[in-house]
Amino acid sequence: NAGVTQTPKFQVLKTGQSMTLQCAQDMNHNSMYWYRQDPGMGLRLIYYSASEGTTDKGEVPNGYNVSRLNKREFSLRLESAAPSQTSVYFCASTLVGGRTDTQYFGPGTRLTVL
Amino acid sequence: EDQVTQSPEALRLQEGESSSLNCSYTVSGLRGLFWYRQDPGKGPEFLFTLYSAGEEKEKERLKATLTKKESFLHITAPKPEDSATYLCAALAGGSYIPTFGRGTSLIVHP
């Protein structure tokens, strides 16, 4: 099992460019999440998908869109990148209603917007 | 509003010097309390889940305990490789979204 995988690992964008961050899990989890992590701010939830076919806003959704492509994949799109979106992005997944409800995280995407 | 507060923010220990990290939580109907380890440049790595007051779990030099208001991560005789940021998160009953603390940065000097 690979667990949660994310691509790309690193990305540099210019202001106004767009990109999509990809996330996939092979643990048969039903819920998936996108967080950003900034120094001194901790993990902040951007969007989540409680189950296939549903998505909801988290704490900091502005400037982002998501797609739950299927049960395994959950992508995060920046339509017009801004320097304030420079951050480390983590995808996570969990089996809600399962034995533990524990979130498992991917390795992260380090994004710099110039 | 659900809240999780971790203390201290940073902790420096000598190798072999045992200590504890604190995670205070305020959530409605705790369903689970999670501990993670995060190394620089990597994603959080799951350590423990605790479900009810009085529960304890151990892994190598780490032991996590839970009361009705807080959780402790005890580190016994730490080694330099235990240096990392330790994150705590609490999940309220009926919620899909855990509330994370900001973490404790632990440095263990040889």
Image (cartoon, helix red, strand yellow):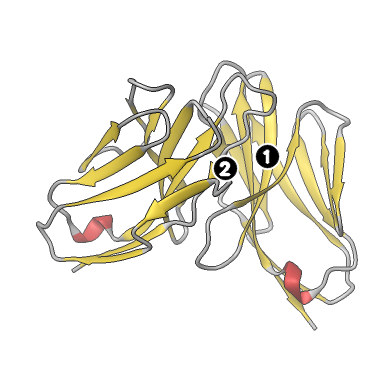
Which sits in the foreground, B95 or A17?
A17
Return the residue at label 2: A104
Question: In the current view of this chain or complex, which residue is farthest to the bottom?
Answer: B110
Secondary structure found at label 1:
strand
Question: In the current view of this chain or complex, which residue is farthest to the top?
Answer: B94
Amino acid on which the number 2 mark rests in the picture: Tyr
- B69 vs A46, left or right, is right
| Residue B57 image offset from top left, x and y in percent | 85, 42
Answer yes or no: is residue A26 visible. yes
Secondary structure found at label 2:
strand
User: Chain letter of disc 2?
Assistant: A
- B77 vs B26, left or right, is right
Which of the 4 image quadrants contains residue B12?
bottom right
Question: In the current view of this chain or complex, which residue is farthest to the left?
Answer: A16
- A17 vs A95, left or right, is left
Q: Residue at x 89, y 73 (%)?
A: B16
Q: Which mark is residue B34?
A: 1
Q: Residue at x 56, y 23 (%)?
A: A96
Which of the 4 image quadrants contains residue A49?
top left
Quadrant placement of the C terminus of chain A: bottom left
Answer yes or no: is residue B106 visible. no
| Residue A6 image offset from top left, x and y in percent | 41, 52
Mark 2 and mark 1 on one chain:
no
User: Chain letter of disc 1?
Assistant: B
**Image position of A104 with respect to A68: above or below:** below
Question: In the current view of this chain or complex, which residue is farthest to the front?
Answer: A1
Alpha-carbon span between mark 2 and mark 1: 11 Å
